[in-house]
Amino acid sequence: MSALDIIELDATGLQCPMPLLKAKRALNAMETGQCLRVLATDRGSVRDFRVFAEQSGHLLLESSDGDGVYTHLLQKR
């Protein structure tokens, strides 16, 4: 997967549930197999994206935390 295959969504500064809602909207506009990287500062996004992936069937490929910015990488299914 190259950087060109990843769509990035900056949801920093937004509180729950906005990062997840913006991610859902972005995923709806994407094609199966494409990846979405979400940047969020809401600590609750870690749990939110894990549960969302389990319930929606999208793959949560990665979640990480660096300097208070949570990065979530999802692949649309």
Image (cartoon, rainbow, N blue to C red):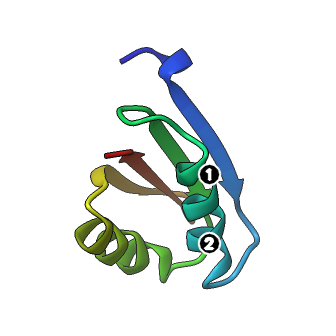
Q: Residue at x 47, y 34 (%)?
A: 31
Q: Which residue is mark 1?
A: 26
Identity, as a three-letter code, of the amino acid under mark 2: Leu
Q: Residue furthest right?
A: 13
Q: Nearer the viewer, residue 33 or 16?
A: 33
Q: Residue at x 31, y 55 (%)?
A: 58
Q: Which residue is mark 2?
A: 21
Q: Residue at x 27, y 74 (%)?
A: 55
Q: What is the quadrant of residue 40 in the picture?
A: bottom right
Badge 2 local density, few (<14 within 10 Å), some, or many (20+)? few
Q: What is the quadrant of residue 12 in the picture?
A: bottom right
Q: Residue at x 62, y 51 (%)?
A: 26
- Coordinates of residue 7 in the picture (x, y in percent): 59, 34
Identity, as a three-letter code, of the amino acid under mark 1: Ala
Residue 43's tag is: none
Placement of 24 over or under 15, stated as above or below: above
- Coordinates of residue 8 in the picture (x, y in percent): 62, 40
Q: CA distance from mark 1 to mark 2?
A: 9 Å
- Coordinates of residue 66 in the picture (x, y in percent): 49, 54
**Image quadrant for the N terminus?**
top left
